[in-house]
Amino acid sequence: MKDFFRSIDRQFNGFIINLAGGAVLLLFFAVLVVWSDFFLRLVFGCALLIAAWISFYAALKLYQIKRKIKDFIPRIK
């Protein structure tokens, strides 16, 4: 039971760190937008890539948590 909750906690920590890292990158890109049109295009493209990366990572983590919960439920009964 301890291992189950430790594993879930680790996955949530990874998800939180990923969201925070993506937010820092987006904040950095927001500062770059001020300088020129080229940076605006570059930042917009990178922002879309970061949003896609965070979405795929979130989907993977949620799937892993779902799988762990599904494996854990029969052991409780």
Image (spheres, rainbow, N blue to C red):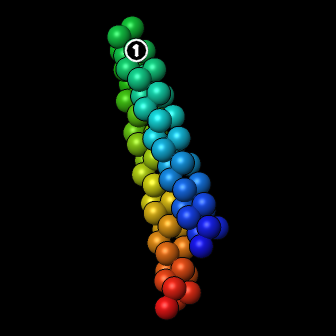
The residue most toward the top is: 35
Q: Position of residue 2 (x, y in %)?
A: 62, 67
Q: Eyeballing the image, is 73 above or below 65?
A: below
**For this view, does 12 lie left or right of residue 33?**
right
Q: Which residue is mark 1?
A: 31
Residue 40 lies in what quarter of the image? top left
Q: Residue at x 53, y 41 (%)?
A: 17
**Label 1 amino acid?**
Val
Q: Position of residue 76 (x, y in %)?
A: 51, 85
Q: Residue at x 51, y 60 (%)?
A: 61
The residue most toward the bottom is: 77
**Label 1 environment density (alpha carbons within 10 Å; few <14, some 14–19, many ≥20):** few
Q: In the rendered image, which quarter contains the N terminus?
A: bottom right
- Could you say which is closer to the camera, residue 25 or residue 5? 5
What kind of element bears circle 1? helix
Q: Eyeballing the image, is 35 above or below 47?
A: above
The residue most toward the right is: 3
Q: Position of residue 8 (x, y in %)?
A: 54, 62
Q: Eyeballing the image, is 32 above or below 25?
A: above
Would residue 56 be visible to someone looking at this image? no
Residue 37 lies in what quarter of the image? top left
How many numbered marks appear? 1
Q: Residue at x 54, y 48 (%)?
A: 13
Q: Position of residue 46 (x, y in %)?
A: 45, 33
Q: Residue at x 55, y 81 (%)?
A: 71
Would residue 26 be visible to someone looking at this image? yes
**For this view, does 60 lie left or right of residue 33?**
right
Q: Eyeballing the image, is 7 above or below 37?
A: below
